[in-house]
Amino acid sequence: MKKALVCGAGGFIGSHLVKRLKAEGFWVRGVDLKYPRFSPTQADDFIVGDLRDLSVCHEAVDARFDEVYQLAADMGGAGYIFTGENDASVMHNSAQINLNILEACRRRNSFRIFYSSSACIYPEYRQLDADNAGLAESDAYPAAPDSEYGWEKLFSERLYAAYARNHGFEVRVARYHNIFGPEGAWNDGKEKAPAAICRKVAQAGNPGEIEIWGDGEQTRSFLYIDECLDGTIRFMRSDWAGPVNIGSEEMVSINRLAAIAAEIAGKKITPRHIPGPLGVRGRNSNNKLIFEKLGWRPSQPLANGLAKTYAWIDQQVQKAKRLKDAPKPVIRQPEIVAAE
Ligand code: NAD
Ligand code: GDD
């Protein structure tokens, strides 16, 4: 039986990836600071541990794995990575994890390793216009990411490439473009625009109003989790190292994203634009290279994935509301009987 290690298996993409690898018949070990938040892990073995600690990495890679997926990172949406407040920890934590896990893999000859980089590595100067024609992999340099999160990802891309060059690793580096779906962060400050907008629409009345950061004309493309995993696994098993975009080419403005979510919910929603962390003005994936190398590229319309995501977030919102509205248990004080 083939063995896979998933670092970050308690997170959004990692927990879905574990399910996928189990369905394929792998023996899977997950590692994370925490268990998945929304459903039990399907990993055969799960280490709750801190990958910044080299001894935890050695414990995780205690034998050779056929496939290692390194997804663990200190990350979040615009509200987490663009405020500046988390810069030091994002850089320190994620770089430390990558430095450690590569060394642990080297000791056990676990050479095939997938690394999840990000569209955030692309230079800001190529993303100043909302009408972005798509970022090709070769656009990465001269480097000028707009966030420290992006700089750490770029550094780690180079670290993986160096381990390939000097130590015989077979690295696979993908640049994910805003992945979304059920069981992702939706209300903890790390949520990205698709989850945040679905939550706001689910919480709004009908007719209702939702807040959108900025003028809402900034653009992104969003990739549904199932297609992200299809691409990840195909790429991992291919004989090509990347880096490659794994993202959708269906670019929309955030206002349009909100309009689609409102349509799905069957609500009449008016956006209210407020100041907030914005990131780049326009971003889209260019999938020419992935199609050329793997004969595959994402194809599902945004609205399909968003409908499934909205349904799940609406459930979470209703569940949270029921808990809040439930009558509080009355705690009775024991009666004090006066001494005679
Ligand atoms: P996530 O935050 O849900 O998952 C990351 C997991 O890493 C979390 O469960 C977290 O607890 C774990 N982790 C963090 N520090 C750790 C530590 N010191 N030791 C052990 N575990 C630790 O994020 P995700 O959306 O599942 O993203 C997975 C990967 O893909 C990340 O590397 C992220 O940067 C990258 N990525 C994601 C997106 C996206 O849109 N989701 C886009 C680009 C890149
Ligand atoms: N999160 C969020 N919440 N974003 C909002 C909101 C809101 O309520 N309203 C408007 N936005 C806008 C943000 O201001 C930003 O301009 C845009 O929606 C997209 O925000 P996010 O989805 O949070 O992040 P991102 O696309 O800028 O970056 C994400 O994707 C990268 C890969 O493409 C992050 O998750 C990165 O960590 C990731 O690497």
Image: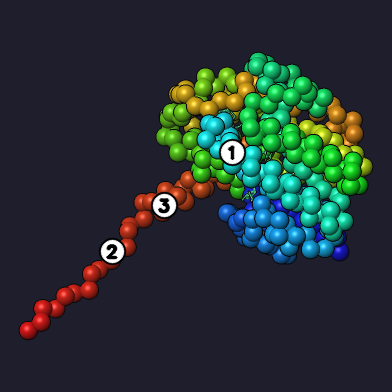
Ligand 2: image quarter: top right
Where disc 2 sits, the SS reads loop
Label 1 beta carbon within 8 A of ligand 1: no
The mark found on residue 322 in the picture is 3
Whether residue 311 is visible to the viewer of this picture, yes or no, is: no
- Along the line of sight, the residue nearer the viewer: 238 or 98: 98
Q: CA distance from mark 1 to mark 2?
A: 45 Å
The mark found on residue 330 in the picture is 2
Looking at the rendered structure, the kind of residue marked 1 is: Ala
Task: Tell which circle, 3 or 1, labels the residue nearer the N-terminal end.
Answer: 1
Of tags 1 and 2, which is closer to the observer? 1
Q: CA distance from mark 3 to mark 2?
A: 18 Å
Looking at the rendered structure, the kind of residue marked 2 is: Val
Q: Residues within 10 Å of mark 3 (few under 14, many from 20)?
A: few
- Along the line of sight, the residue nearer the viewer: 250 or 27: 27
Whether residue 202 is visible to the viewer of this picture, yes or no, is: yes
Q: Is residue 6 left or right of residue 200?
A: right
